[in-house]
Amino acid sequence: MTTIEQPGVVYLVGAGPGDPELLTLKAHRLLSACDALVYDSLVPTEVLDLVPDTCERRFVGKRRGHHSVPQPSTNAVLVEMALKHNTVVRLKGGDPFLFGRGGEEAAYLAERNIPVQVVPGVTAGIAAPAYAGIPVTHRRAGSSVTFVTGHEEIDKRRPSVNWQALAAASDGLVIYMGLHNLPRIAEELMAGGLAPETPVAVIQQGTVAGQRCLKATLSDVAAETRAQEFKSPSIVVVGEVIDHQVEACMPTPAAVTMPIPF
C-alpha cells in the first residue's frame, strides 16, 4: 500500500436527506476536490458524481436484511484511506453526528492520530417533514421535540428506547428507521399515555422523487403504512405539529431517486 508522509484529513461530511441542493457549500467543495470517498447507502448518484474521476471510492453502507459492512471494517477503511490520501471524505446521509455513528468514527480516528473534521449536514428528521409542509416544532403545538431511532436491533448493546417514558416526556417525536418496528412503537406509546387519536405522519423518500406522506392516528398508522406499502427510508412524526401542516409551502422534491435500502 502506498502511504503519504503524514496522514490525510478525514472529513465526516453530512450529505443531507437526498436533494443534492441541500448539500452545504463546504460539503460540495470537499466532494469536488477529495482524493478518496467512503460512503453510505442513502446517497444519490447525483451527489456521488461530484467527486473527481481520480477519486478512490469505497462503499460501506448498511442495509436491512443484507450483508452489511461491520463498523470495525469501516473504521479500518478510514485509517487505510487516510494513510494513502490527503483529503478523505466520509460521506453519510443526513448529519454525521445524528444516528450516523460519526461520533464513534471520529473518536477512532483521533485515537490513532488521524486528523478528523466534521461537516454537519441537513438531517432528514427536519427536512423530510419540512418537504411535506410539517414543522417539527410549533408555538401552538408544544415546546419540545425528541429525535429517536426506532431501529434498535442495529446494535443489541445499545440501551433500549423507553417508548412509554417518551410518550409523557416530549410534545413531539421524530422517529428515524422506525417503519419496521412501528406496530410495537405505537403500542408502547399508547401504553405510555398517548391518546390513540394522536396525529402521526410517515414521510417516505423525503426530499427526492418518490416522496409520499401518509397521515393517520397512532392507533391505525401501522395498519395504514402496511396497506399503502410504505417502505424505508421513512421518517415518522408523532404529535400535534402534524395538524399545522402547510401544504402551500411544500418544496418540490428533487428529481433524483435515492437508493432503497433492502
Image (tube, rainbow, N blue to C red):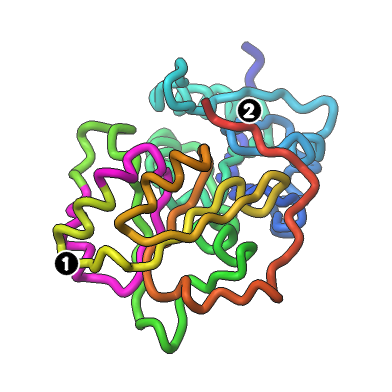
The percent coordinates of residue 66 (x first, y second) are 46, 18
The percent coordinates of residue 84 (x first, y second) are 64, 23
Secondary element at tag 2:
loop
Q: Amino acid at mark 1?
A: Gly
Instruction: Tell me where the magenta segment starts and ends, as one range.
Output: 161-184
Report the side of 142 relative to 120 (left or right). left
Q: Is residue 24 magenta?
A: no
The percent coordinates of residue 239 (x first, y second) are 37, 70
- What's the residue at 44%, 54% (across, down)? 236
The percent coordinates of residue 230 (x first, y second) are 52, 41
The mark nearer the N terminus, 1 or 2, is 2
Secondary element at tag 1:
loop
Q: Contact (CB < 8 A) between labels 1 and 2?
A: no
Circle 2 is placed at which residue position?
A: 5
Does any portion of residue 255 appear in the rendered image?
yes
Q: Is residue 163 above or below residue 150?
A: below
Q: Judge by depth and name the residue closer to the eye, 32 or 4.
A: 32
- Examine the image and state in which quarter residue 51 appears: top right
Q: Tell me, for residue 243, which label it has, or none.
A: none
Q: Amino acid at mark 2?
A: Glu
Q: From mark 1 to mark 2, how far is it between C-alphas?
A: 59 Å
Q: Is residue 73 above or below residue 231?
A: above
- Residue that extends furthest to the right in the rendered view of this protein: 53
- What's the residue at 76%, 51% (across, down)? 254
Circle 1 is placed at which residue position?
A: 193
Does any portion of residue 102 appear in the rendered image?
no
